[in-house]
Structures are given as C-alpha cells and as structure tokens.
Amino acid sequence: MTEADAHWRGDLTLIGGLSTVNRDLALYVMRLLDVDAERAPEPPVAEEASLGHRMVRLGRAIQARAERRQPQDDPPPSQ
C-alpha cells in the first residue's frame, strides 16, 4: 500500500467517523432540548462521555490531517 493509499483510507475513516458523530450529536442536542422541556430524562453519563471521547478523537484526527497537508515552508496555523 502506498502512502497516498494510506492517507485515502484514513480520510475515508475520518469521514465515516464524522458522519456518525454528526448524527449522534444531533440526537444528543435534541435529547437535551427534550430534557430542558421536561419531556425526557437526562442522557446516561456513559453515553455522554462516549460521545465526548469520540468527538475529541475525531478532532485530533482532523488536526493530524491538517498537519500532514501543511506545506513544509508554511508556518503551522495558530491555535
């Protein structure tokens, strides 16, 4: 497998993860709105923590992709 193939597979994995978290985040927001309106109980702590951990992992993957794509002669973006 070439380096380009590895990056392509990594990008597909990232896109799949982002798609899944996007859906789960939308459901989470809707659930919190229901909680606020007293139509639903709070989500389980483990479910909330799992979503947060997945979001952090995906954020790191996006940062790693950006760093990989950063031209060598350009300074890294400020944080």
Image: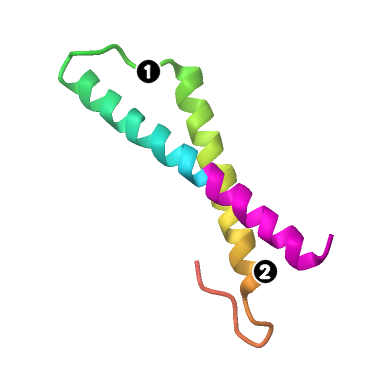
Location of the N terminus (image quadrant): bottom right
At 41% from the left and 32% from the top, the residue drawn is 24
Within the image, what quadrant is residue 17 found in?
top right
Secondary structure state at the residue bearing disc 2: helix
Report how far apart the C-alphas of labels 2 and 1 lie in the structure.
37 Å
Task: Say if the magenta span includes residue 5.
Answer: yes
Which numbered tag is attached to residue 65?
none
User: Left or right: where does residue 37 sit relative to residue 1?
Assistant: left
Task: Say if the magenta span includes residue 75.
Answer: no
Q: Which numbered disc, 2 or 1, marks the residue that appears first in the sequence?
A: 1
Q: Amino acid at mark 1?
A: Pro
Per the picture, the main secondary structure of the magenta-coloured stretch is helix
Q: Position of residue 53 (x, y in %)?
A: 55, 35
Q: In the figure, 59 relative to 67: above or below?
A: above
Label 1 crowd bin: few (<14), some (14–19), many (20+), radius 10 Å: few
Q: Which residues are drawn in magenta?
A: 1-17
Label 2 crowd bin: few (<14), some (14–19), many (20+), radius 10 Å: few
Q: Position of residue 45 (x, y in %)?
A: 46, 18
Q: In the figure, 78 relative to 33: above or below?
A: below
Q: Position of residue 3 (x, y in %)?
A: 79, 66
At 59% from the left and 67% from the top, the residue drawn is 66
Q: Amino acid at mark 2?
A: Arg
User: Left or right: where does residue 21 sit relative to residue 42?
Assistant: right
Front tag of 2 and 1: 2
Which numbered tag is attached to residue 68?
2
